[in-house]
Image (cartoon, rainbow, N blue to C red):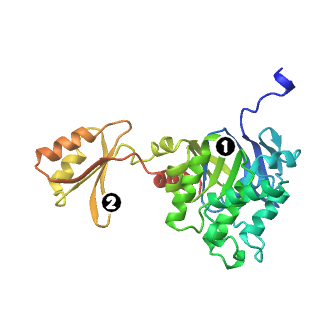
């Protein structure tokens, strides 16, 4: 027995066999996972994969057909108020009262959360500052751009400084500078929270997530760190080589014959086409490729080892279930 008779919470988010049916359609098929403090889980999947439905059930916004979601030890169906005190949720297309200003809306949210007076003002000001709403705080929400509306939604999710954040497409509608600022904010908060982010932007997973989960057709297909998923890419350990002049056919043929080479293919940016030398599992091709091109006197413009590509892994995993 622990002090006070209460066992410590080991996982801030626990998802146990969540199922959601809409009539004959089973949108989510028994998904289970946990998220601990300090983890940022990127939720990936094609449209209709079940990402948003799973997040709605985890947040207590949508009742599951079966299974359970637990936030900081509280079942979101059986103990909704206790769970939601620990939770900040940004849904897809988060709605706000269009005739209210961000200041008025966030004050309303603070009051709903039980804050009053100076404490409510402090929390509103802090949330607004974190997402940089200052210059639009007193404009009607209906007049704001999509990006600023999204930031208002994010501010309400952060206002009570919850231990758990569930954010559905948090950078949707933001410009590149705004995306960078929101990603930096998520990284800054991550140490003390458990965070789930749904996104279709693969660079976002690489930028902010400590873990990535790929789902399709309502089931989990892959779960690991971004590096572990990248290692499943056919480009993992590939060598990209680009000369100042295009490599001749003889050089390409010799690269293809190196031990441990699976294949070679042209690729790169339109203005910087080079050759990918793809490796068989676990083979380090960089020294051999470097030696061959040096021996042929090829002047190198670019030579690098590829980590792997989340986009190719994503396509391979999800296409296999179509």
Residue 248 visible? The answer is yes
Residue 92 visible? The answer is no
Q: Is residue 296 left or right of residue 44?
A: left
Q: Is 149 situated above or below 29?
A: below
Q: Position of residue 222 (x, y in %)?
A: 58, 45
Q: Residue at x 66, y 38 (%)?
A: 37
Query: Considering the numbered disc 1 on the image, is that residue within a helix, a strand or a loop?
Result: loop
Quick one: which residue is furthest to the top in this view? 1
Image quadrant for the C terminus?
bottom right
Q: Position of residue 255 (x, y in %)?
A: 22, 47
Q: Position of residue 198 (x, y in %)?
A: 63, 55
Q: Is residue 112 left or right of residue 230?
A: right
Quick one: which residue is furthest to the front in this view? 118
Look at discs 2 and 1 and give the one toward the viewer: 1
Q: Residue at x 73, y 67 (%)?
A: 103
Q: Which residue is mark 2?
A: 268
In this view of the protein, which residue sits in the foreground, 199 or 177?
Answer: 177
Q: Is 8 situated above or below 117?
A: above
Q: Residue at x 23, y 38 (%)?
A: 287
Crowding at dot 2, Cα within 10 Å, few <14 / some 14-19 / many 20+, comes out as some
Query: Considering the numbered disc 2 on the image, is that residue within a helix, a strand or a loop?
Result: strand
How many marks the image carries: the answer is 2
Crowding at dot 1, Cα within 10 Å, few <14 / some 14-19 / many 20+, comes out as many
Query: In whole angstroms, how far apart are the C-alphas of marks 2 and 1?
Result: 38 Å
In this view of the protein, which residue sits in the foreground, 70 or 87?
Answer: 87
Return the mark for residue 193: 1
């Amino acid at each position: 027995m622990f002090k006070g008779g209460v066992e410590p919470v080991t996982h801030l988010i626990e998802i146990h066999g969540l199922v959601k049916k809409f009539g004959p359609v089973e949108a989510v098929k028994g998904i289970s996972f946990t998220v601990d403090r300090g983890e940022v889980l990127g939720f990936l999947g094609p449209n209709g994969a079940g990402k948003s439905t799973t997040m709605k059930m985890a947040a207590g916004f949508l009742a599951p057909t079966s299974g359970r979601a637990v936030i900081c030890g509280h079942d979101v169906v059986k103990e909704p108020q206790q769970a939601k005190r620990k939770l900040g949720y940004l849904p897809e297309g988060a709605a706000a009262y269009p005739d209210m200003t961000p200041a008025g809306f966030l004050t309303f949210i603070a009051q709903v959360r039980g804050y009053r007076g100076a404490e409510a003002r402090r929390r509103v000001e802090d949330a607004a500052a974190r997402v940089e709403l200052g210059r639009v705080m007193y404009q009607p929400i209906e007049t704001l751009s999509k990006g600023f509306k999204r930031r208002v939604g994010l501010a309400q999710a952060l206002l009570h400084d919850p231990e758990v954040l569930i954010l559905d497409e948090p950078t949707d509608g933001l410009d590149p500078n705004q995306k960078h600022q929101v990603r930096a904010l998520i990284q800054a908060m991550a140490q003390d929270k458990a965070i789930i982010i749904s996104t279709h932007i693969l660079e976002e997973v690489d930028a902010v997530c400590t873990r990535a989960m790929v789902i399709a057709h309502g089931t989990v297909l892959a779960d690991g760190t971004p590096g572990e998923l990248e290692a499943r890419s056919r480009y993992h350990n590939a060598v990209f080589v680009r000369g100042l002049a295009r490599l001749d056919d003889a050089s390409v043929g010799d690269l293809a014959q190196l031990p441990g080479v699976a294949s070679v293919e042209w690729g790169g940016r339109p203005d910087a086409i080079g050759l990918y030398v793809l490796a068989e599992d676990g083979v380090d091709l960089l020294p051999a490729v470097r030696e061959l091109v040096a021996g042929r006197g090829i002047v190198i413009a670019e030579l690098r080892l590829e980590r792997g590509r989340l986009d190719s892994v994503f396509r391979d995993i999800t296409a296999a279930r179509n």
